[in-house]
Image (tube, rainbow, N blue to C red):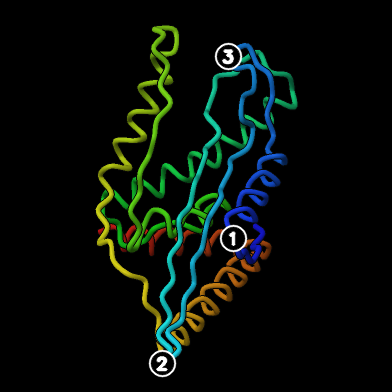
C-alpha cells in the first residue's frame, strides 16, 4: 500500500491513473480483459482544529474486486490458474469477514488476508458500504451471477452505526497502544507456528474463536 499527499484534483487523478496502469489483466474465453488483481483506491481527508486540537478524519475507498471465474470456462493457462487461486483465496477471506460482520460475531478475522486488512475500515466500525454487482444476463453464467448476488446480500446484512471519526490526543494514544499490542500478538503467533508448539497454539486459537462466537 502506498500513501501519497495530495493538494488538488489533478494530482489525485494522476495518482489514480498511475495505480490503474499497474493493474494485472488477462484475456480469457470469458473476458477480453479479465481483472487478475484487485484495485483499492482511497481518498483520505485529515483535518485538525487549530483551536481545540481535535482531529477529524474521513476516508472514501473505491474497491474493484477481481471476479472469481471457473477455469473450465476461462481456459486459462498454468499462470492464469495460479492467479485465479490467489483471487479465490482473497475472496474467501473477504467472504468470511462479511459473514462474521453480518452475523454479529464478536471476533472478525480482518487480519486473515491483505485484502481484508485494507478493507477493514470500509466494512466495519462506522463505515457505510455500497456494493455494485456486475451480473451477466446469460443463462450460461447463472451460477456465477447467483454467487455474486448472494455475496452482495450478505454485505447488505452488515449493520454499522455511521458517524464522524473524531480523534482526540487521548484516543489516538490509546489506539496506538492497541495497534502495537495487536502487532506483537501477531508476531508471537507467527513465532509459535514455526515452533514445536504449533498444534497447541492452533487448538487454543480455535477454542478462543469458538468462545467469541457464542
- Relative to residue 3, is residue 128 depicted above or below? above
Instruction: Give percent across and percent down for residue 64.
Output: 52, 39
The numbered mark, 1 or 2, whose residue comes first in the sequence reads 1
User: In the image, which disc is placed on residue 8?
Assistant: 1
The foreground one among 207 and 82 is: 82
Mark 3 sits on what residue? 30
Q: Quadrant of the N terminus?
A: bottom right
Q: Residue at x 68, y 38 (%)?
A: 23
Q: Horizontally, is 10 left or right of 103 in the view?
A: right
Of circles 3 and 1, which is in front?
1
Q: Residue at x 39, y 58 (%)?
A: 108
Q: CA distance from mark 2 to mark 3?
A: 57 Å
Q: Residue at x 53, y 55 (%)?
A: 42
Mark count: 3
Q: Residue at x 28, y 61 (%)?
A: 162
Q: CA distance from mark 3 to mark 1?
A: 39 Å
Amino acid at each position: 500500500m502506498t500513501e501519497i499527499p495530495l493538494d488538488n484534483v489533478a494530482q489525485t487523478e494522476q495518482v489514480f491513473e498511475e495505480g490503474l496502469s499497474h493493474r494485472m489483466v488477462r484475456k480469457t474465453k470469458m473476458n477480453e480483459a479479465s481483472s487478475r488483481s484487485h484495485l483499492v483506491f482511497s481518498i483520505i481527508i485529515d483535518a485538525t482544529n487549530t483551536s481545540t486540537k481535535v482531529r477529524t478524519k474521513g476516508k472514501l475507498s473505491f474497491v474493484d474486486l477481481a471476479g472469481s471465474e471457473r477455469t473450465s470456462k476461462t481456459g486459462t493457462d498454468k499462470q492464469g490458474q495460479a492467479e485465479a487461486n490467489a483471487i479465490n483465496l482473497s475472496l474467501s477471506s473477504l467472504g468470511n469477514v462479511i459473514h462474521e460482520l453480518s452475523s454479529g460475531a464478536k471476533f472478525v478475522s480482518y487480519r486473515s488476508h491483505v485484502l481484508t486488512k485494507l478493507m477493514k475500515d470500509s466494512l466495519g466500525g462506522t463505515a457505510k458500504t455500497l456494493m455494485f454487482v456486475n451480473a451477466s444476463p446469460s443463462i450460461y453464467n447463472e451460477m456465477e451471477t447467483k454467487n455474486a448476488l448472494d455475496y452482495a446480500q450478505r454485505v447488505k446484512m452488515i449493520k454499522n452505526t455511521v458517524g464522524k471519526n473524531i480523534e482526540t490526543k487521548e484516543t489516538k494514544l490509546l489506539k496506538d497502544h492497541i495497534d502495537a499490542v495487536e502487532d506483537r500478538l501477531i508476531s508471537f503467533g507467527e513465532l509459535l507456528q514455526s515452533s514445536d508448539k504449533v498444534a497447541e497454539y492452533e487448538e487454543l486459537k480455535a477454542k478462543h474463536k469458538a468462545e467469541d462466537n457464542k
